[in-house]
Image (cartoon, rainbow, N blue to C red):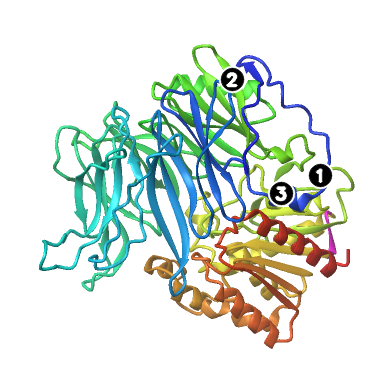
Amino acid sequence: MRVSCLLASAALIAGSIGPLAAQQRTIADPAAAFGTRPSVEDISLSPDGTKVAYLAPKAGQGSAVYVANLNGGEPRLAASADGDPQRLVGCEWVANDRLACKIFASVNALGALPVTRMVALDADGSDVKVLTQQDDIDQRYGNTYGGNVIDLLPGDDGAVLLDRWFVPEIARKTRLAQEKEGFGVVRVDTRSLSTRTVEEPVRFGAEFITDGHGKVRIMGKMLPKNAGGYLGRTINYSYRTADSDRWLELGDYDVISRDGINPLAIDAKLNALYALKKENGRQVLYRIALDGSLRQERIFAHPQVDVDGLIRIGRSRRPVGATYATEKREAVYFDPELNRLAASLAKSMPKLPQIRFVDSSVDESKLLILAASDTDPGHYFLFDKASKQLSEIMLVRPKLEGATLAEVTPVTYKAADGTSIPAYLTLPPGGPKTGLPAIVMPHGGPSARDEWGFDWLVQFYAARGFAVLQPNFRGSEGYGDAWFQKNGFQSWRTAIGDVNDAGRWLVSQGIADPKKLAVVGWSYGGYAALQSAVVDPGLYKAVIAIAPVTDLALYKEESSSLDREFVGSGPHIRQGSPAQNAERINAPVLMFHGTLDSNVEVRESELMESRLRSAGKKVQLVTYPKRDHYLEDSQVRIDMLRKSDAFLRSSLGM
């Protein structure tokens, strides 16, 4: 489906943006409007700043990459994938006329198996080359990992650094076998496919970080858990000085507890690493000298929440700021020019306070910017530093332009033990604000959190007249160790208690009609929805779970060793599993699941359905063939929204 783009409007940075008029129209078909995938799913600016390449959805899970000239003209199709099973999931420019794109597929191989591949192509779709190591009958095993571009090599024309898993070959009489095995880095010319190994493969390699100019400066290796070779939870990091190839000790990082040094990116000019470290149970941003001294400088910390990421820009992906989320996502810039620009943009677009620098030209004279809000899915702009012009070029969701959407309000409520729980409340636009049918919507993860902004699922239910409350229950990420506890599985009693207290708060405030209160969740949120009905069978009158974990023992069977350790062992495995306690659920249950879900296998929902039926409960399971965890198919999402809306209205007597 071709995106309507390249809008003609432009405005000076000092002025207000003209096209962002007050939203007025109502939505005739909310399921279609909100269930349709975004018209722009990924976007990249060419090195010279004259073109963008963007991904747009096609039928089913299909996707297409288009190239648009910012000086005018219709976007041109460069490549497409039908989604059965391959789909394009991201493209970036490696030269002014060439792209590198990632292909993803979920395939059925004794269960859903995610597979990726990297390809390169010219902007007109010609000269397609596969960058991933080619499969060969002599390989000892198949390789599902297609690699990632870890350095765009700004000074080179079309070459990149790609991380890669090296697969050894079986020895044959006719030739020598390739015996290398492990995680390494190669330099690939995307035009000729000339390839040179930059970092020899490491058997337990986990990560490589470059300086953005072609030199690998950080290496991470997973430490074995025991002599048997099973991988543990600790990554050991090494670094190099700028003038040496010798690896030096940096430190360890525990991926579950988040203790130690977590490297993020390198500033080549400062010869320093930006990394997260824990202080007083919260993540803090540090700058660490890579000159051999490992001198540490505390760059930014927030007293209430974790610093959770870096803002990076340019072809070298240089670090320019840090980001964190309180009631809303915030940014602190340590690049003075961008700090001034961000402040100016905020004044120019007060209705679009979520401003993100997406990409830039190689000289950073042109910036690709996304601006959005809770009631606006987003507009892409090009900012020209020389002319100080901000030109609107594309909408994220054109079908919602001018529509009346629901405002999202940060709130807090008291849990049973008196703890204040942060949450987001969305009320239907217009009409009454009390006595409403209402939904508690716990987020996925559980190592995640909800944030202020546009959410297609929340906005759909609000458009259908529901109040929606999204609690950042204890077990959510971003608030430090004390809040995270042992995570939402091992500390399920606290997490689910907070979810149920969210429902009680809606009733106590008069927002929700207690007879019309439901719980809806996706992934861990689906688990939380089901388990909340186990803990308090009378609270919710309807339960919707999308791709839920339902049995912790079964989930551990499906998972990696790290995920198994994350879930843990003990009495909570049975006590905290909805499928093991299905007889306690009184509310009718509706579940949705894709049959090629590699995150949470469909048998989780099948088991839950079986247990509920055996217990004489009302349950329905809707499965979507060949769809994965995120149901990235517009018609599937539209169908899910319509079925869930009908289920809620029937179950709640609406």
Mark 2: secondary structure: strand
What residue is shown with label 1? 27
Callout 2, which amino acid? Leu
* Earlier sequence position, callout 2 versus callout 1: 1
Q: Is residue 155 visible?
A: yes
How far is disc 2 from disc 3 in space, using C-alphas? 28 Å
How far is disc 2 from disc 1 in space, using C-alphas? 29 Å
Q: Quadrant of residue 378?
A: top right
Q: Is residue 375 visible?
A: no
What residue is shown with label 2? 390
Residue 350, given in percent of the width and then of the height, sits at 68, 26
- On residue 314, which mark appears? none
Residue depicted at 70% across the width and 61% down the height:
640
Kindly indicate whether the residue at mark 3 contacts the one at mark 2 (C-beta within 8 angstroms). Answer: no
- Assess whether residue 589 is covered by the magenta stretch: no
- On residue 34, which mark appears? 3
How far is disc 1 from disc 3 in space, using C-alphas? 10 Å
Per the rendered image, the range of residues in magenta is: 511-515
Q: Nearer the viewer, residue 24 or 97?
A: 97
Callout 3, which amino acid? Phe
